[in-house]
Amino acid sequence: MVKAYAVLWCLTIRLLQKFYLTQYFRLKLNLKIKDIHKQMQITTLSKQKAFGGTQGVYSHQSESTQCEMSFSVFEPHKAQTEKCPVLFFLSGLTCTQENVTTKSGFQQYANQAGIIVVCPDTSPRGTDFPHEHDDYDFGSGAGFYINATEEPWSKNYRMYDYIVHDLPELIEHHFPASLEKCGIFGHSMGGHGALIIGLKNPQKFQSISAFSPIVAPIQCPWGQKAFNGYLGNNQSLWQSYDATQLILNGKRSPNSILIDQGSNDNFLEEQLKPELFLNACLNKEQPINLRMQEGYDHSYFFISTFMQDHIQFHANNLSQ
Amino acid sequence: MVKAYAVLWCLTIRLLQKFYLTQYFRLKLNLKIKDIHKQMQITTLSKQKAFGGTQGVYSHQSESTQCEMSFSVFEPHKAQTEKCPVLFFLSGLTCTQENVTTKSGFQQYANQAGIIVVCPDTSPRGTDFPHEHDDYDFGSGAGFYINATEEPWSKNYRMYDYIVHDLPELIEHHFPASLEKCGIFGHSMGGHGALIIGLKNPQKFQSISAFSPIVAPIQCPWGQKAFNGYLGNNQSLWQSYDATQLILNGKRSPNSILIDQGSNDNFLEEQLKPELFLNACLNKEQPINLRMQEGYDHSYFFISTFMQDHIQFHANNLSQ
């Protein structure tokens, strides 16, 4: 009789155990789902009609940068009835998503080509590390599209992961986006971002272009300052975020790379040095079209002048 | 002998008088020339290549507003070899010359059409009257393109004279401008400015268009506040700066007037009321093309979407 009670007691304990363990894991799972759900939530900050399409600005909690990030999305008229290819524009030092969204006029050509254009911010926001906001070329507004490894930057300054993983997933979840057709372009620091992210992920981003990009950050003051601060002294990491080195190390884009560079750009000789990238591409037989644009500077007037060509270039590549 | 001395003395006095008077008037004349010269001087703040032309920003000392005013001028490529027609764009509340210059993308179409585009500021600057900078719709950034008669505004807030007299003279003096071919357009408060200045000076400004203009300031809160502050209670003065009243009182433009108005504009019903102007034009047989643009708001996305049409409209009118 005692044995029967003992068995009954054991069984009861087992059942209770199982029940509570199940409850525990269910709770954990729910929390996890809630977490993912929260990461996938976006807040609409504005939505305006532009050139027949819709220009929106949104924010969301990013897993990679561990903070609230804002970004803009232009949906062409065509997106009302079918999924469209996506083009990411990465902005330069000091910018947010707003500059290119309000100044470059890309909406006109994106609407004509039926392409969704996504413009992210240039760094994490809302953090306040020592000296984070002191310089225009380091810290806030200057994320350089890499994953920082140095303290205190390594937790939030993960713009590479943000652009490669977080943002495309979010776009696919919320917009009529056909993510298997994807291009990337950018300006200056954002041109560097477009080149390295495109070259390191050629299946994800099949089409790359840039306006006055930093093509060899490890060989110019802007890049050296940023890489030193975010990556410390790790030279192989430096090389893995340098477009010219990536080409020399065998990375390729499936299409020709389009670069426009103003001849009257104040940063041309010290910071940009497009010839370094051109030579690497010629050396490694990566097709490239570097166009020196006579008399143009580093501004949005330059960008807007050649925006139509860039959108057309990506539209052609992505329609193949 | 005494008589001879007296005559000699008189003659000497006369000569001295003449000499000093001449000197005096010469001095005054020189000062006047210097003054005109100073008024005609401009300072170049920036010059950038854009869409094949040149986008410049300048400042000068205005006689009408008695202060330093900044303005932008776009010169199309064509202006390098021949004189071009001129189009003045008047901006809306809170703006400077910068908004339309950097956001609307007019340069592309102005270069194609071979038209110089001049964008002035929206009020005098550098003054500091009580409450001048308190409200977005009165005082600085809100000159309303009229000549104020009330204190303390009457000395500087003379934007009507500034646009009609100072600026065209300055443009003719410094740029390859053909001022006998001249158009005027603007946005919101600047649309009001374009309408009243065009209608009151049809020989000077032969072509008028507007984006979401205030067409009847004496019948809306923005206009009533501004006219009350700048003009006091003088109702005949109010009427002389009201586009709808000007049409009803017989003023005309030699060409059809083009107006674009977004249907989703927050200010449409309370402030803009385009139907009042439309009815006046129909009543008085002033040709007008009022286009309600479905879904567009009051922003620069709206302006940039229809900028090409407006530049083309003026180019056609000015080529006749």
Image (cartoon, coloured by chain):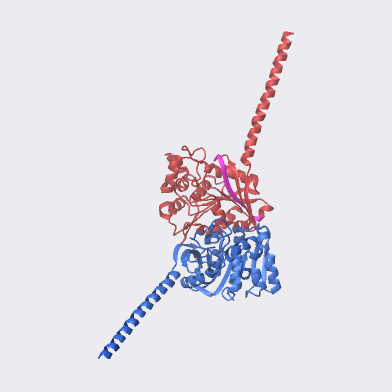
Chain colours: A red, B blue
* Up-down relation of residue B66 to residue A288 (above or below): below
Residue B87's x, y, as percent?
A: 55, 69
Residue B278: quarter of image? bottom right
Residue A310: quarter of image? bottom right
- The residue shown at (66%, 50%) is A83
Regarding residue B316, the answer to whether it shows in the image is no
Left or right of B152, for residue A264: left
Q: Quadrant of the N terminus of chain A?
A: top right
Q: Nearer the viewer, residue A262 or B5?
A: B5
Residue A19's x, y, as percent?
A: 69, 24
Q: Tell whether position B171 is magenta.
A: no
The number of numbered discs placed on residues in the rendered structure image is 0
Residue B122's x, y, as percent?
A: 54, 63
Q: Tell whether position A69 is magenta.
A: yes
Tell me which segment is drawn in magenta. A65-77
Q: Nearer the viewer, residue B233 or B58?
A: B233
* Up-down relation of residue A6 to residue B277 (above or below): above
